[in-house]
Image (cartoon, rainbow, N blue to C red):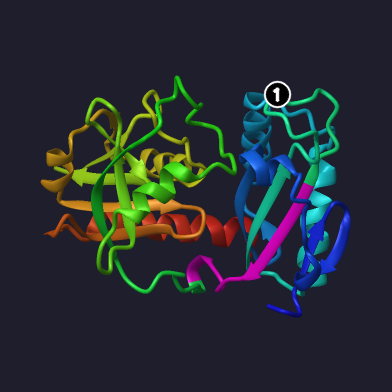
């Protein structure tokens, strides 16, 4: 890691020298947008979707950073090339930058832009998962922040909701499952939830307090393309516990089966396996 280079405000710098100001609003207030991406064979998967979501977050924050999508992409590509990375985890962050220490943001923005990258295993049909087994998941008391308070579609640096959820975990649990204020299951601290019952692929609707994950969207498209019944709705925890299969999705994990939820064995199964295969095939054709 000491030899890795990060992209900070237009410059490639060694990891040990990659810093931002203590007056940066991303540090002070979490006033920043970010995207987690994966590159396979040097190709950023679904870059257009990530760029669009990043801009949506910036719009929600009224953060006019002034950088084009091509400029941001160039910084990602430069970071990958400088670190000789083809298969990688990439995090792109855009903060409002340094401003006077007042909560009210100023309209003039000199953004802080950081690109961080680290190696991950090859993906696609010849790849290996980055996780070491099905996830152990526990439901938590922490509730998902309602969309009316903080837009669910916004990926900001303020991750306290997920941190509080993860802090509740005990033992070897891998993920915390949050519900909304009405008691409907919403999502994991860093993942979207899917479960299968009677052959139907079910997932909490993004009409509720759920992040519209890009991997989530891909899985729904793959399921529909394979003529699998799909349902987006509102579900109680008991319905998930009675599922035939269950899995989590995010950009890093791709599809990860849920081994157990609150001590109840769930596991993957034929539908999860099929969707995982279809996802691998999509990565293979798009990136390799």
Point out residue 174 in the picture as x, y percentages from the top left corner. 33, 62
Depicted 63 relative to depicted 178: above or below:
above
Q: Can residue 119 be seen here? A: yes
Point out residue 102 in the picture as x, y percentages from the top left corner. 72, 29
SS for callout 1: loop
Q: Mark 1 points at which residue?
A: 104
Magenta stretch: residue 121 in it? yes
Residue found 80% across the figure and 59% down from its top: 7
Rendering quarter of residue 110 = top right
Whether residue 81 sits left or right of residue 192 in the image: it is right
Whether residue 240 sits left or right of residue 149 in the image: it is left
Point out residue 85 in the picture as x, y percentages from the top left corner. 71, 71
Magenta stretch: residue 39 in it? no
Point out residue 21 in the picture as x, y percentages from the top left corner. 78, 51
Whether residue 269 sits left or right of residue 27 in the image: it is left
Residue found 74% across the figure and 50% down from its top: 22
Depicted 158 relative to depicted 58: above or below:
below
Whether residue 50 sits left or right of residue 207 in the image: it is right
Rendering quarter of residue 132 = bottom left
Q: Can residue 189 be seen here? A: no
Depicted 103 relative to depicted 262: above or below:
above
Rendering quarter of residue 60 = top right
| Magenta stretch bounds | 113-125
């Amino acid at each position: 890691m000491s030899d890795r280079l990060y992209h900070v405000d237009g410059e490639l710098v060694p990891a040990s020298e990659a810093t931002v100001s203590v007056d940066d609003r991303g540090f002070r207030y979490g006033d920043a947008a970010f995207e987690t991406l994966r590159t396979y064979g040097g190709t950023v998967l679904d870059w257009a979707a990530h760029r669009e979501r990043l801009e949506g977050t910036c719009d929600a924050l009224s953060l006019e950073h002034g950088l084009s999508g091509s400029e941001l992409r160039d910084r990602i590509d430069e970071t990958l090339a400088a670190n000789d990375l083809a298969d990688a985890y990439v995090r792109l962050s855009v903060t409002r930058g340094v401003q006077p220490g007042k909560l009210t943001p100023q309209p003039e923005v000199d953004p802080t832009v950081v690109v961080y990258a680290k190696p991950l295993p090859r993906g696609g049909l010849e790849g290996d998962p980055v996780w070491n087994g099905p996830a152990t998941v526990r439901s938590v008391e922490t509730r998902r922040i309602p969309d009316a308070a903080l837009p669910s579609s916004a990926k900001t640096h303020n991750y306290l909701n997920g941190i509080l959820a993860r802090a509740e975990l005990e033992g070897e649990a891998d993920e915390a499952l949050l519900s909304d204020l009405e008691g409907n299951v919403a999502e994991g601290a860093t993942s979207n939830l899917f479960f299968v019952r009677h052959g139907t692929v079910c997932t909490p609707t993004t009409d509720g307090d759920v992040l519209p994950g890009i991997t989530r969207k891909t899985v729904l498209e793959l399921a529909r393309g394979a003529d699998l019944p799909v349902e987006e709705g509102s579900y109680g925890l008991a319905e998930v516990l009675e599922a035939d299969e269950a899995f989590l999705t995010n950009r890093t994990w791709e599809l990860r089966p849920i081994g157990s939820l609150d001590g109840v064995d769930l596991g993957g199964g034929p539908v999860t396996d099929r969707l995982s295969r279809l996802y691998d095939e999509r990565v293979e054709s798009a990136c390799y």
